[in-house]
Amino acid sequence: MDTPRSLLERLRRQPDDESWKRLVDLYTPLLQRWLRQFRVEGADAADLLQEVFATLVRRMPSFEHNNQCGAFRCWLRNILVNHIRCFWNARRTTPFTDADDILRELDRLVDPASDLNQLWDQQHDTFLARRVLELIEKDFTSSTWHAFRRVVLEGAKPAAVAAEMGLTVNAVMLAKSRVLRRARQEIDGLTD
């Protein structure tokens, strides 16, 4: 069986509706969280989110993953920051806005040495790992998922899980392996 190309490679080389839907499903909640953090809410947040994805559609063919940790994460963060920055720059003269404070925070977000930048990296990777698991759970039988969850997420010993479920240890380890392989395929290139 051929290993499917990563989501990023599919979007870069041969984008299809399913791949774009997967990217949108993966990233929408995380991007919404960061938009709220920078006080972009409601219809403005929905508009900015669409603009971020539209930028990704336009620029993805030219994205070159440089094999550095976090290349896509950094690229996406910069796209998001640029859109938020434009949003708040347009509102700087509006009374009762904290646009200048927010713009300073955006500068911190893109500074690789800042705690905010490191928080983005951590939240991105943690969120994406959880989100991928949410999205792929439906693709496995309940027993496969249960064995995986017990061993990987809850730290149970494979022998104990096998005894609980009436399976062999080998079946438990295969379940773990299948889910992890699929999760790695889904997340390939998106996290460190």
Image: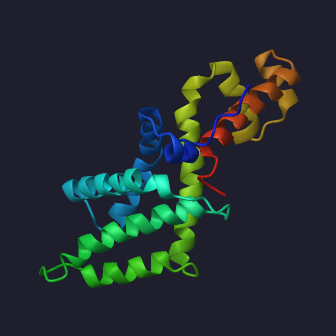
User: Taking 173 as reference, is 62 above or below it?
Assistant: below
Q: Residue furthest top?
A: 166
Q: Position of residue 52 (x, y in %)?
A: 35, 57
Q: Nearer the viewer, residue 95 or 7?
A: 7
Q: Nearer the viewer, residue 145 or 177?
A: 177
Can the viewer see residue 123? Answer: no
Q: What count of labels does the image hold?
A: 0
On the image, which quarter does residue 156 sit in?
top right
User: Taking 184 as reference, is 107 above or below it?
Assistant: below
117 relative position to 28: left or right: right
Name which residue lies at 53% across and 44% down. 13
Name which residue lies at 63% across and 39% down. 5
Q: Position of residue 97 (x, y in %)?
A: 19, 78
Q: Nearer the viewer, residue 92 or 53?
A: 53
User: Taking 2 as reference, is 154 above or below it?
Assistant: below
Name which residue lies at 44% across and 68% down. 78
On the image, which quarter does residue 192 sit in?
bottom right
Can the viewer see residue 53? Answer: yes
Name which residue lies at 54% across and 61% down. 73
Q: Position of residue 40 (x, y in %)?
A: 27, 64
42 relative position to 159: left or right: left
59 relative position to 41: left or right: right
Quadrant for the N terminus, please. top right
Q: Position of residue 87 (x, y in %)?
A: 25, 70
86 relative position to 147: left or right: left
Colouring used for the render: rainbow
User: Taking 133 as reference, is 62 above or below it?
Assistant: below
